[in-house]
Image (cartoon, grey):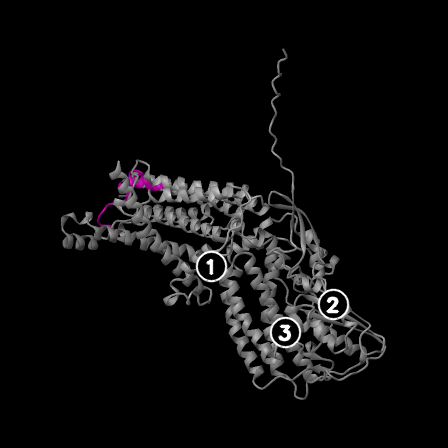
Amino acid sequence: MIETLSKVFSSLLILQLGFVLPVGFLHSYFERKIGADLQARVGPNRVGPLGLFQGIADQLKLLQKVSPELKTPQLALWPALQLAALHAAMVTVPIAPHLLMTITGLSILLPLWCILMVSVCSLLLGVNSREFTGWLAGLRSAFQAISGFLPAMISLISVGLSAGGFQWSNLLSPHDSSMGTWLMFREPFLFVSFLIFLASGMVILSLPPFDSTASGPDLRGGLGTLFSGRRSSLSVIIKFYGVLVWCVLTVGLFMGGWALPGFLSSVLVAVLGEGAANTFAYQAIQVFLVGLKTLSLMMVLGVVGRVMPRIRFDQVADFSWRALGPISLVCLMGSALLKAGGISP
Amino acid sequence: MMTMAPAPFQTEVLQTDSTNWVMGPYHPGLPGLMQLKLVLDGELVVSARTETGFAHRGLEKVFESEGWTAGVLISDRLDPEGAIFGELAYCQAVEDLAGIEVSERALFVRTLAAELSRVVSHLGFVARLARTVGAETLFHYVQRDREKFVDLFELLTGARFSLNFLRMGGVVHDVTDGFLERVLEVCAVMRHRFKEYNDLFSYNQAFLGRARATANITPEAAKRVGLSGPNARASGIAMDTRRWAPHAAYSKLDFDVVMGEEREGDCHGRYMIRIREIVQSMDIIRQCSEIMPTGSALGLKADEKFKIPIGEGFSRVESSRGLLTCHVLSAGGERPSRVHFRVPSRAPLDLLPEIIPGCQLEDIPLVLASLDLNLAEIDR
């Protein structure tokens, strides 16, 4: 029992210190820098060398602020539940084989349910906000989450079908994962499923340009402005965590996850010996690789959000039901046919 | 012993009444201090009423307590974004009343300043509209380009806003050496920017999906409320004061009335017409620079005390927002006895309760931005 607890605790510590914090640090810098470059601005350049510590300075500033009393006690509960759900999701997403704390036959579905929990909490947060704008934002959030969930689920089933199961071990081999062997490049339907899965995540999490829940001009910032003072840092963390979980999930499903490219794997085995996969260096490289892929994906989502104008929430739902849903179904059928015909590996 | 009867089963009824929501007077989606009293069915607007007057300054009354020349500075505040139009309307009305002659060069300098002001105002419109739909990237691009035109005002007048540049009979100081060349350089750079704007935003499907067929204004409705300027032209009304009642040097310049080629009278049409007008304004600026006459452009000195004869003067100006008129009455003293402006933002505000019903709540800031309302001139 104590051994299990100590293993879980050390895994969580490694997860936070070795993955979440570095990715968060780099994301906060590069997202701002690339965003500023796109918008003909300079971006962070004051705090730390090249402005690297701007994100930390911002969080510290927020933490120093006084939080006014909440209108209802539930307003403290729902963000806490959101954070808990996202933490729970982190232990089921594939960052490294030794950091996976839950292995079930439906492993790849678990993070999705955690994300859905975040959306439910957003709805309840809006309803309990005692503000008309918060109420509308909560409803929009739920409306989008429902419409985005269906295509995401169908895409997930396509992946499970092609991989032959819903366990990470079905999807990710420990060795030899060059780009060509990634699931998204295995057949055209899976590539479309990848795009649909990514877009669905943006819809569910209300990321720009699907962020009508946080629209400034009509809802005065919506859910994002329900909290002020140091509590507002919580909404920033939840938003970042949501994107992180979705991107890690996408990397695990479609982009080879922790599996190292063949040449790198061979080199490491040659250097570290037969039991290389169990060494710290090997696992650290696996975590680094997942982090790199995740960060790249987060950057892509950030650029899309910066460039596109905001899409109205009913148009987002329309897009999900009429485009993403049917196309994901076609992809599912296509993948099934290819699998049945023995064309897909 | 009494027995309690079981409570009758009550059906839960879902309340589906409409919701009342008052936006403003302080709200980021509004163009200024105003209230929009909405009745909503879900997120669909059923009806709307407007209320203004939250920032009334008694501007027209101030004219009556100041001298004739000080009126130029006051008329600056009519529309802070297009200060030159208020000045121009006031100066022309006083010149009409007193029969003051304006030199040919001064007319061209005034035209040049007016068109530069139109470009700045329209670019401000594009930036505001982009922001209402979350297009932050375009907002930054436009602000970057707008700054270059505001710099030109600094070169010309010494001020970036509140220019205080016109005087009765001319302008306060002539254009400096190299100014016209600098104007042409900035315009040349600006011409290349439109491709960037159009690629990024003007024909972006996400923007088209929101702006097309939203808050349409029919030509009949536009005529009924006296809509003018780009808003009227987007609804198919070919009315431009610069053409049908030319002021300044417009009669000597070659240009056409810009008309909407997009779907009539919707938010996208109102956006596109302003983009085209920026191009047209830059062409007018080029013409002004090429045929600028020589001579003096200076008007009467600010410290010169003068009396205007008894009578009334009237002027029309095509401001960036539409038809701006000024009516001045003089009792023969050192200050006007009455100054009244007819401002172009009033008509679209009156039309708002008619065009908003049927729109989504999320589109209201977009509709307001597309009408380019200026609360400062309404609450003058």
Q: In the image, what residue type sits under mark 3?
A: Glu
Q: Secondary structure at mark 3?
A: helix
Residue A128 visible to an observer of this rendering: yes
Q: Which mark is residue B59?
A: 2
Separation of marks 1 and 3 at Cα, in angstroms: 30 Å
* Left or right of A206, for residue B65: right
Tell me the SS state at disc 1.
helix
Quadrant in which residue A166 is drawn: top left
Q: Chain of mark 1?
A: A
Q: Residue furthest top?
A: B1
Q: Residues within 10 Å of mark 2 (few under 14, many from 20)?
A: some
Q: Which mark is residue A101?
A: none
Give the side of residue B52 with respect to residue A269, left or right.
Answer: right
**Residue in front for this viewpoint, B9 or B180:** B9
Residue lying at 38% horizontally and 57% vertically, measured from the top left: A27
Q: Residues within 10 Å of mark 1 (few under 14, many from 20)?
A: many
Q: Amino acid at mark 1?
A: Val
| B104 falls in the magenta region | no
Residue drawn at x 39%, y 44% is A86
Identify residue for label 1. A307
Secondary structure at badge 2 equals: helix
Cα separation, mark 1 vs mark 2, equals 42 Å
Q: Tell me where residue B203 appears, x and y as whole percent.
A: 52, 59
Q: Is residue B224 above or below residue A98?
A: below
**B102 vs B125: above or below:** below
Q: Position of residue A66 (x, y in %)?
A: 50, 53
Q: How many marks?
A: 3
In this view, A9 is above or below B81: above
Residue designated by label 3: B115
